[in-house]
Amino acid sequence: MVQISFKTKKLGATLNDIRLLERSYGSTCGRKIARRMAVLAAASSLADVPTTPPERRHQLSGDRDEQFSVDAEHPYRLIFEVANDPMPRLADGGIDLRKVTAIKILAVKDYH
């Protein structure tokens, strides 16, 4: 199981309570965020989180390089980073997703 931590206590409290999720993001989006959290928590590693919809896990670029996101309800995404220490790396310097077993949720937002 992937261990999940949060950037702030408030974010953690919100993302772990369906009532707070629905109050903050609306009923439909709140439920989708809860489902994405369940998928992330149930995965053995980040490599097990689907790259196809509805989750659509993908690595970000630019100023968010080495961060990832999964889709919630358009335009919102759950943004997170690897929390393993040290960060598992491939020989080419990329992140070894098969060895990522801890993530830190940074935000739920539209970053575009």
Image (tube, rainbow, N blue to C red):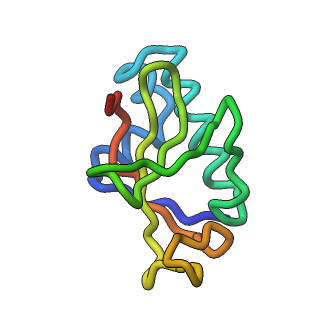
Location of residue 35 (image quadrant): top right
Relative to 25, say whether 6 is above or below.
Answer: below
Which one is nearer the viewer's eye here, 70 or 29?
A: 70
Residue 80: % across, % down: 42, 52
> Quadrant of the image for the N terminus?
bottom right
> Quadrant of the image for the C terminus?
top left
Left or right side of 16 for 99:
right
Residue at left offset 52%, top offset 71%: 94
Residue 102: % across, % down: 52, 68
Residue at left offset 44%, top offset 85%: 86
Residue at left offset 54%, top offset 15%: 28
Which one is nearer the viewer's eye here, 20 or 93?
A: 93
Location of residue 11 (image quadrant): top left
Residue 92: % across, % down: 55, 78
Residue at left offset 58%, top offset 84%: 91
Which one is nearer the viewer's eye here, 17 or 66?
A: 66
Relative to 56, say whether 42 is above or below.
Answer: below
Relative to 40, say whether 92 is above or below.
Answer: below
Relative to 36, say whether 85 is above or below.
Answer: below
